[in-house]
Image (cartoon, rainbow, N blue to C red):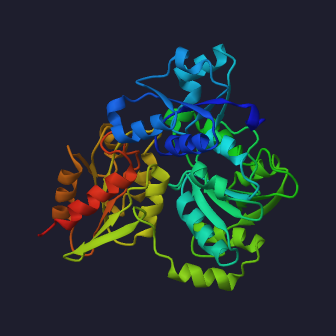
Amino acid sequence: MDIKNIKTICVAGWSKTGIALARMLLSLGKKVKITEIRQKSCFLPQLIKDFQLKGANFEFGGHSEDFISNADLVVLSPGIDFFNSQLAKIVVKNHLAYCGELEFVSYFSEAKIIAITGTNGKTTTAYLTYRLLKKKNKKVYLGGNIGRPFSEFVLDTQKGDLIVLEVSSFQLETVIKFKPYIAVLLNIKPDHLDRHKSFDNYLKTKMKIFQNQQKDDWAIIHKNDNLHKLFSSQINSKIMYFSDEFSNENLSAAYRIGKIFGATKTDCLSLFSQFRRLPHRQQLVKVVDRIKFINDSKSTNPASTCFAVKSIQSPIILIAGGKDKGFSYASVANYARKIKKVNLIGQAADKIKNELNNKIKCQKFDSLEDALLSSSQEAAAGDVVLFSPMCSSFDMFANYKKRGQRFIELVGKLHQ
């Protein structure tokens, strides 16, 4: 792609990633058009005005052919389900070039990219890797799905730098030439089936992280995952396996990445011994009357919730529910002896109750506040009240962080 000859770029989707991307493109002197399906009222007027003063044009409330058809390139934010959208029909009809933000932004850097994906544990592994590599390298950047968009810092990078990216399946959907120096697949469990339609599609999307790698690159895969046999036959790069070098797979994967850049096991032990869980990931919020309240709002699929339940030794009252993503919750029933009750909220509550009710007692509530209050009253000394939703937040909250913060606020009010 000859970036110099591309004059007009349409940014599709104007959330955090789209905003950073539009800002980057304007700094490069490109003509920027922004198409956003939400209404204008969802955004701060001053933010829109600031971009308009810099030359950006907007359309809100949908994606229209008149607005998009004269663009040289359409760059997609990861939140857009492109292949199931009206936008795709417009792009195909008008023979427009398109790519995802991850793909496009990678063309602007000569730094070595470490891309980390998987169903669970991406953020923790990316953060640990960043901290580990910072001990050995002066210029290391952290971004992607972890919170800081790639486009926000890519123009600051140069050859010899390292970029650690947390990469989601949504970002990998539109990969064409994206080629990380190190590609990491932590694990694969059913997730985002509401978008990918099947586990097979989800798996193929995750596999795209390896598709452009060459013999001098690295693929890092879990040794004990049966899928590694399938992956190995499709990978052209050098393969390194991780398993149980440390207490969990996040630490072990970070160690393997660090090893490529000269980090020792001693370096890792020093860092890992100081590590505290990131917010909203099995985060101990408070102990009230010897009852532990744990915020695991980042758990947006059953596999992640099962991992949290498995790591807790005490009896559990589980608070779960949210927006259904299209998978089964039956795996939670494997922990029926440990889970005393499941208190449910959100759009998926009926589905979860139907799948678990014969093995675990379940009850529906209208709000997180009601579910927490009931849980605190039902729990006994030594129990754990675990907020691990198994679902996305979008039926009740803007994101998992807002959801987790609300749980923390509510726990803080208990027994006041």
Report the side of 400 relative to 77 (left or right): left
- In depth, the one of 342 and 216 nearer the eye is 216
Give above or below for 351 relative to 180. Answer: above
Give how far across and how far down residue 37 sits, in percent. 44, 27
Give how far across and how far down residue 101 sits, in percent. 62, 41
Report the side of 281 relative to 266 (left or right): left
Furthest residue toward right: 215
Give above or below for 110 relative to 211. Answer: below
- In depth, the one of 138 and 392 nearer the eye is 138
- In depth, the one of 29 and 287 nearer the eye is 29
Report the side of 404 relative to 93 (left or right): left
Q: From this viewpoint, is residue 326 visible?
A: no
What residue appears at the point 38 percent right and 48 percent down from the top-left corner?
399
Furthest residue toward front: 53
Give how far across and how far down residue 378 sits, in percent. 18, 62
Give how far across and how far down residue 357 sits, in percent. 31, 45
What residue appears at the point 33 percent right and 52 percent down from the top-left corner?
402
Furthest residue toward left: 416
- For the C terminus, the quadrant is bottom left
Q: From this viewpoint, is residue 345 visible?
A: yes
- Number of callouts: 0
- In depth, the one of 206 and 190 nearer the eye is 206
